[in-house]
Image: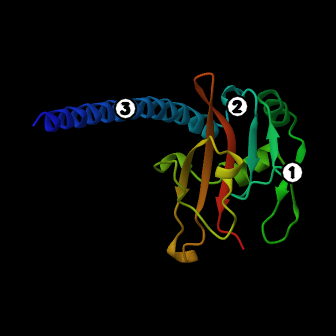
Amino acid sequence: MYKLRILFILICISAISVLTFSKSSREKFSDNFYDLKKTNQTVIKLIKNRDINALSKYVHPKKGVMFSPYSDLKNNENVTLDKKEMVKIYEKNEELVWGSYDGTGTRILLTFDNYFNRFIYDGDFIEYEPNYDSIMGTGNTLENMNSVFPNARSVEYYIPGTEKYAYMDWKSLRLLYEMYKGKYYLVAVIHNEWTI
């Protein structure tokens, strides 16, 4: 009988410690999720309004922000800018090579403004519900954001395709964030769409 009581007490202590740990983990995640959601709501509004000066304050202080026209992130092709460079390039309105067009391999040579129109906010993404830490829009392009940014939290805005185009006209905007000194900062802006 004594052994059963000790076993019962040990089980109760284990259950209480597991529940306490789970609760603190959920609370921590909830706090981080709330911070992520709040930061993202601001960032998507700044993107929609094309307020590059204000947006630059959300660029990761150490890593900068990578821009990718497709979900296959290529460190040697994608443009990564720090916050000062981002503002300067936008204001200068000079052409940059942002990667290669899918299907042709032709260089994407655009001003920041034109890149923005084609590969950042080419749909009214803010009108769609964001998906946190999940991918909605996938095609036949390599999805490697998790290997390039393993510590990032992702937010995807997905615009579904239409019947007229056999649902192949879908597009998405993914914003990747990483924590730095207790705050979320933007590390990548990824456009995605159906590819050849």
- For image coordinates 71% across by 32% down, the residue present is 52
Between 113 and 173, the one lying in front of the other is 173
Where's the N terminus, which quadrant? top left
Q: Residue at x 49, y 29 (%)?
A: 35
For residue 188, side relative to residue 6 (left or right): right
Q: Amino acid at mark 3?
A: Phe
Secondary structure state at the residue bearing disc 1: loop
Q: CA distance from mark 2 to mark 1?
A: 20 Å
> Which residue matches tag 3?
21
* Mark 1 surroundings: few (<14), some (14-19) or many (≥20) residues within 10 A: few
Please state which of residues 15 and 136 is positioned toward the viewer in this rendering. 15
Say if 163 sits above or below 107 in the image: below
Q: Amino acid at mark 2?
A: Val
Q: CA distance from mark 3 to mark 1?
A: 42 Å
Residue 152 marker: none
Disc number for residue 76: 1
The circle drawn on residue 59 is 2
Residue 159, image x and y in percent?
Answer: 53, 58
Q: Position of residue 167 (x, y in %)?
A: 54, 73
Residue lying furthest left: 1
Point out residue 102 in the picture as x, y percentages from the top left corner. Answer: 78, 67
Looking at the image, is mark 3 or mark 1 earlier in the sequence?
3
Mark 3, mark 2: which one is toward the viewer?
A: 3
Circle 3 residues within 10 Å: few <14, some 14–19, many ≥20: few
Q: Nearer the viewer, residue 100 or 164?
A: 100
